[in-house]
């Protein structure tokens, strides 16, 4: 069983951290978690060999994997969220969208 991940709904608490190094990856992951939570999405993370930050599901099953795990859940469309990179990859009949997180949050694709 994978340990639970904890996300801060108020990102101001991150300023209380003893670490002075800037960790953009954790901040981005936390922002995505907050957005999914606000959209009332059921989500979990998945680790099998690598780690998938967010697997989003609804009553029909797994909708999408954000960052990885498309093959494990037989998903045809995947998503990688970044700060500013945008691209699309096709491989083995599967499509991976690489999108800036702000566009994903605004629904602009």
Image (cartoon, grey):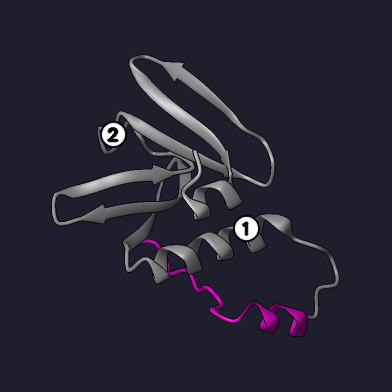
The crowd level at tag 1 (other Cα within 10 Å; few <14, some 14-19, many 20+) is some
Report which quarter residue 15 is drawn in: bottom right
Outermost residue, top side: 92
26 and 48: which is toward the camera? 26
In what element is the residue under mark 2? loop
Q: Which residues are magenta?
A: 1-17
The residue that mark 2 highlights is 75
Q: Is residue 41 left or right of residue 18?
A: left
- Dot 1 or dot 2: first in sequence order is 1
* Figure disc tally: 2
Position of the N terminus, as image quadrant, is bottom left
**Magenta span dominant secondary structure:** loop
Q: Looking at the image, which residue is at 50% across and 74% down?
A: 6
In the rendered image, the vertical position of residue 56 relative to residue 90, given as above or below: below
The image shows residue 74 at horizontal and vertical percentages of 25, 32
Res 27 → quadrant: bottom right
Q: Specify whether 12 is left or right of 92.
A: right
Q: Which residue is the site of mark 1? A: 28
Q: Based on the picture, tell me whether residue 16 belongs to the magenta stretch.
A: yes
């Amino acid at each position: 069983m994978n340990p639970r991940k904890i996300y801060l709904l108020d990102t101001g608490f991150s300023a209380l951290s003893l670490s002075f190094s800037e960790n953009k990856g954790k901040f981005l992951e936390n922002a995505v978690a907050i957005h999914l939570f606000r959209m009332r999405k059921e989500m979990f993370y998945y680790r099998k060999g690598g780690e998938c930050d967010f697997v989003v599901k609804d009553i029909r099953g797994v909708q999408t994997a954000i960052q990885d795990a498309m093959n494990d859940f037989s998903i045809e469309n995947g998503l990688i969220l970044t700060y500013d990179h945008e691209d699309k990859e096709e491989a083995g009949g599967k499509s991976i969208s690489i999108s800036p997180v702000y566009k994903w949050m605004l629904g602009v694709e």
